[in-house]
Image (spheres, helix red, strand yellow):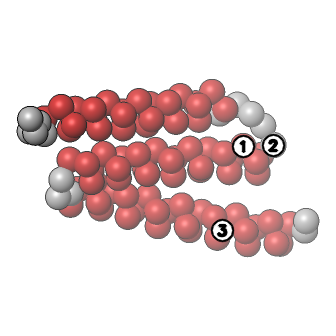
């Protein structure tokens, strides 16, 4: 792949990741519910992971691989924890 095409793709990916991060931050601030905020933070963690993966692909290294795995695990465990917390707080039907 030529350097010009690679640069165009890199700029496009960076723009999409930036827009996604901005939308996730806006949803985190705006809410309105706890689940909306948790989902937005999970999306933001995914965007950060994607940005680190793009960096690894462009620079041809694997230095951030453990960080990506940890970010994904934190996002997953956090989402599951909040979901279980929300389920426990709902009134039970008998």
Could you say which is closer to the camera, residue 88 or residue 24?
Answer: 88
From the viewer's perspective, tell me whether residue 81 is left or right of residue 9.
left
Q: Residue at x 50, y 30 (%)?
A: 73
Q: Observer-nearest residue: 43 or 7?
A: 43
Image x and y of residue 42, in percent: 41, 46
User: Are dots 1 and 2 in contact, CB under 8 Å?
Assistant: yes
The residue that disc 2 covers is: 60
- As displayed, is residue 75 above or below residue 27? above
Residue 15 drawn at (x, y percent): 56, 68
The quarter of the picture where the C terminus appears is top left
Q: Of helix, strand and loop, which one carries label 2?
A: loop
Give coordinates of residue 76: x percent, y percent: 45, 35
Of the two numbered discs 1 and 3 on the same chain, state the one appearing first in sequence.
Answer: 3
Residue 30 in the image: above or below residue 79: below
Q: Crowding near pointer 2: few (<14 within 10 Å), some, many (20+)?
A: few
Decide if residue 67 is on the left or right side of residue 77: right
**Extreme residue in the front direction:** 94
Relative horizontal placement of residue 16, taking residue 56 as reference (left or right): left
Residue in view at x 21 percent, y 37 percent = 87
Q: Which numbered disc covers residue 11? A: 3
Which quadrant of the view contains residue 5?
bottom right
Cβ–Cβ below 8 Å for labels 2 and 3? no
As measured in the structure, the alpha-carbon distance from the residue carrying label 1 to the one carrying label 3 is 15 Å
Tell me what residue is drawn at x 41 percent, y 30 percent: 77
Please tell me the numbered disc located at residue 56.
Answer: 1
């Amino acid at each position: 792949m030529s350097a010009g095409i690679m640069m165009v793709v890199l700029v496009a990916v960076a723009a999409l990741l930036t827009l996604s991060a901005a939308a996730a931050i806006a949803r985190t601030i705006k809410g309105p519910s706890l689940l909306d905020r948790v989902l937005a933070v999970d999306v933001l963690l995914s965007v950060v992971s994607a940005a680190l993966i793009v960096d690894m692909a462009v620079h041809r290294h694997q230095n951030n691989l453990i960080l990506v795995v940890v970010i994904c695990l934190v996002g997953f465990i956090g989402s599951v924890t909040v979901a279980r917390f929300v389920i426990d707080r709902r009134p039970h039907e008998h």
